[in-house]
Amino acid sequence: MRITIFICLFLYSVLGRSQDTFTPKKSEVSKINIDGVLSDGEWENAVRIPLDVEFSPANNIAARKETIAYITYSGRYLFVGIYAKDNPENIRASIRPRDDNNFWNDDVILLRLDPYADARNNLGLAVNALGSQFDIKQVNALSDEDRYDSSFNVNFESKGTIVADGYQVEMKIPFSEIPFPNGKNQTWHVNFYRRYIENGNEIEVSSQPRDRDNSCVVCQTTDRLVLNDVEIDKRLEFLPYLSSNLSAERGTPETKITYGEPKVGVGLGVNLDLNKNTSLEVTINPDFSQVEADVTQIDVNSPFSLLYPERRPFFNRGSDLVNFSGGAFYSRSIAEPTVAAKIISQGKKSRFFVLSALDNVSPYLVGGEDRSFIGSGGRSLANLFRYQNLISNTSRFGAVVTSRFYDGGGYGNLIGMDGLFLLNKKWRLSFEVFKNFNKEPVQDWIDTEESIQEKSIALDGDKLNGNALYFQLYRNTEHWQSVFFYRDISPQYRADIGFVVRNNRRWGTVVHRYVNIINKPGLQAFGFGTKIDLVYTHQDLFKNFSVDLAAFIKTYGQTELNYTLDFDAVKTFLGVRFRNLPTHQFSLSGAPSESFNFRMSANTGKDLSMNEIIPEVGLLRSSYLTLGIQINDKLNVNPSYRYSRLERTNGSSDYFKGSIIRLNVRYQFNQAFNVRIIAEKNSFTNQFYIQPLIQWNPNPSTIFYFGGNQTTIEDLEDAHFQILQFNRSQLFVKFQYLIG
């Protein structure tokens, strides 16, 4: 009887609890010292929030380990304390740079804030046991890939300490860094999350239960945090920078490498809060050089341009508002602006985003039916206007307008609408529709004689009018996820400041997947599913039909094994039709210990030689391996290996064969200061480079870089240059300091 009563009381407290209200008392700033130690008397005005629900792998049971969160505030700061109980020997923690992906191998505490209480997005501020930071914006997206925006940054202070019975963390968050509605009295939605490893399994706990039948994760952050008499300060920040670049080349192995005159750059950024909801950002002569090198992708058999993530802070801020599944906007299409400005505004019911940039080097991308074409353009003026209206906490619609005007004539204009509607907690519908009005510049940026439906690819002043439709219907329950996705892209559709690499297709996709998260030793989850793709052209020609079958198992050590059969029953490329092209894909990943994680994959089967004049079927063999080795809490070593080969079916030769070997070594002295070196050998391009870097980054805006790029671009096998006899050298330094 007692057991029955206990179970009933627990189910009422966990499953029946939908919303709690927390009202902390104001504290003096001087009372709380952010040292990672929850000292007596510091948190006497704080509210106490227990993380008492384990939602994975168990389904909303009592948490196995005690975790208590504390919240208080002053006029200008929100203070958060965490006491996470655990055996210190089991705690995973290393000193990491901000937003390092290896961060998620550690024990993690995450604070979710929804200041507008409307489920448009959650601000996630995460720390590990040593106080290292990772901040994200959690978006109400349709897929896991689009759900997290890691480019979001909040300048906050954090410290962590491992103690005898677990670890303690303290956070100091300026209200000026958090977007919230006007008014001194605020009611936000709040939630806490903890992740740790026990007996090789990943355990996730929360301050609220998680409904697995609800496809909207951010909608389930519903506890209320009441803050009265908050002081609202307008932010005015200046970001001046000074940089210098020194380059050198060596003509032959016998000659001495010679450096030219240093190139000095000076620029300024300004961030101004027009009011609490609206901010203006301006950058003049920005230095957008890529300090962290993009991970090289194998593109030897890709007929399309490759998409790379945005790393520039100016373009990252507010990027969730202009993230379209159809690629209507791609910030890296603005390559080298002389000046750029943007306004971001978020009100209670609406948001808008305005961007304008004068670009010196304008990438010009033309998507085709089976290939994309890219050229380097000249100066242009790029503009974007984005508006979004919140109908309710579960529904919204928006509009977008983009334009690009080129020096010497030519333009690309695009208008569009989009919407997201939660029909109920299981069903979700979204759409995007776009229309473009283009006049090509008359330029030699693209050299080809190919055409798309009587319109030449070469830039000869053609007028182009196209459209695109993206429609998605999504259903989610605890065990089953189903998706219907339809894309309709006309032959003349282009997005001049977007990323559209293919057109002339009507494309339907159906996905049906089963997932079971279970709480058993040695088996944490498993699942299986199928995907069907059917493609027609706008001329009603049958193009492609494929079926994917997939399965996965997740077990000890966060180890996950995946298998996918990608079967192209019909695949048409460059007018040639192929049948029965199966590809087997295997992947294995895991993090068996604090000091070691891995990810590997292998593909085998049949694929097309897509860069041949006449495509043919070849035998594909490809593999990938990356290791994360944490030598100690400061030193991380990350080697990786990529290999790809497409062999002729008769075994006589290869269409291509090569590998990319990469090594990334980083020593993190503290959260702000590190030394890093990247080395990479690419046999596809016969290139070897080394990139050393000293980096000081005390906050998201203040940076100091000193590094270089030493490159050998030759046929290394013929030994014209020895592998460490560099024929190109670059040294650079940059200092940017936040004022305000």
Image (cartoon, rainbow, N blue to C red):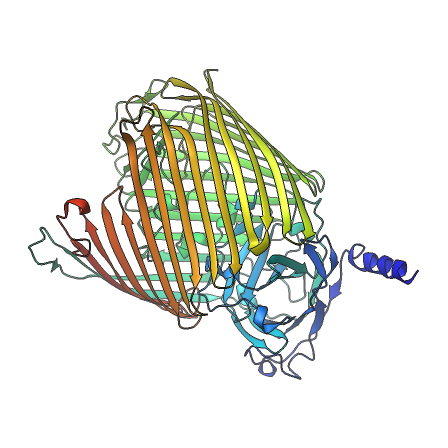
State the image coordinates of residue 66 (x, y, percent, origin top left): 70, 69
Residue drawn at 66 percent across, 84 percent down: 40
Asked if 186 appears above or below 530 in the picture, the reply is: below
Asked if 697 appears above or below 61 in the picture, the reply is: below
Residue 510 is left or right of residue 579, and the answer is: right
- As rendered, which of 508 and 288 lies closer to the eye? 508
Can see residue 179? no
- As rendered, which of 668 and 464 lies closer to the eye? 668
State the image coordinates of residue 165 (x, y, percent, origin top left): 64, 76
State the image coordinates of residue 525 (x, y, percent, origin top left): 63, 47
Quarter of the view holding residue 718: top left
State the image coordinates of residue 161 (x, y, percent, origin top left): 55, 76
Residue drawn at 56 percent across, 40 percent down: 398
Q: Quadrant of the N terminus?
A: bottom right
Residue 86 is left or right of residue 154, and the answer is: right
Residue drawn at 17 percent across, 62 percent down: 262
Can see residue 559? yes
Residue furthest toward the left? 254
- As rendered, which of 72 and 110 lies closer to the eye? 110
Residue 691 is left or right of residue 621, and the answer is: left
Residue drawn at 61 percent across, 57 percent down: 202
